[in-house]
Image (cartoon, rainbow, N blue to C red):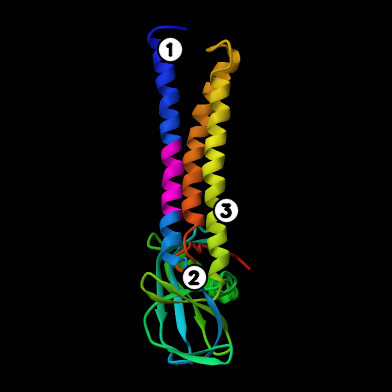
Amino acid sequence: MTGFPAALAYSALALFWVHTLLIAAAGWSEARALLGAWAREARRARVLQGTGPEGQLAVHRVRQVGRSRGDGKIWFHDRAYEAALLGGEVAIGDERRALAAGGSVWPAREKQVAAGGCPGTEAFSTASARAIKASGWERAVEVALGPGDAVWLSEGPDGPLVAAEDPTRWRRRVTALTLALVVGLVLGAAGLTALCLWPPVFGTVSKIGAFAALVVFNLFQLFGKLHHEAIQPPGVRGLGGLWRAP
């Protein structure tokens, strides 16, 4: 194949590479910005007391909307994330430290999942009657950090960070997922390019490679979206959820 059809094919391959590298660069840039904002040394501590109504040091909420099709399931979608460091006192080893109000809060995933679970048949029936409406059923999944809870203290872009999970684990996850995204996209694109240029160019194998590149390109975009969602800090990571009829 020569002339305009060949030029068009090579242009499409070049465009494939441009978009692939843009997706990889966007993922790398976002991860770098997040790590730069939250990559501070964390110290483990224990909550002694908080200034909240029930002694809470910090509270985190995920506001959600639940919708149902009347099939015995309610699907929840996140609408907003709210956090409040109320202030209190923590122990770091033998040292006692007072924390003022204001800062960031990272909740523990397992506590969020437990708090968002269906408490029983009556609660499901009440929620289902509202969730089937177009506006859905609004709720807030709330978790708190109080006396006796283990926390990690660090610094964030908006002041002190109180985390129920070691921030180091999150940073390692972000690094690993970002490396997997960038390396995977480049190696995948290189392999598909080799197929596209397999001699004879525009032969059977070459055409299969071109078709595969077209299909996989959409998957690359999906991988970029999934990477974005997976590397978000615990304070704003997606919760979602599903209730089934008991």
How would you classify the magenta stretch by its main secondary structure?
A: helix
**Which residue has dot 3 on it?**
176
**Which residue has dot 1 on it?**
6
Q: Can residue 242 be seen here?
A: no
Q: How crowded is mark 1: few (under 14 residues within 10 Å), some or many (20 or more)?
A: few
Disc number placed over residue 127 in the picture, else none = 2
The kind of residue tagged 3 is Ala
The outermost residue toward the right is 246
Q: Is residue 176 left or right of residue 78?
A: right
The foreground one among 75 and 175 is 175
With respect to residue 215, does 37 lie above or below?
below
The outermost residue toward the top is 2
Q: Give the range drawn in magenta.
A: 21-31
Q: Residues within 10 Å of mark 3 (few under 14, many from 20)?
A: few
Mark 1 to mark 2 CA distance (whole Å): 59 Å
| Mark 1 or mark 3, earlier in chain | 1
Residue 44 image point, x, y percent: 56, 80
Quadrant of res 108? bottom right
* Residue drawn where x is 37% and y is 62% of the image: 135
Camera-near label (1 vs 2) is 1
Residue 45 image point, x, y percent: 55, 83
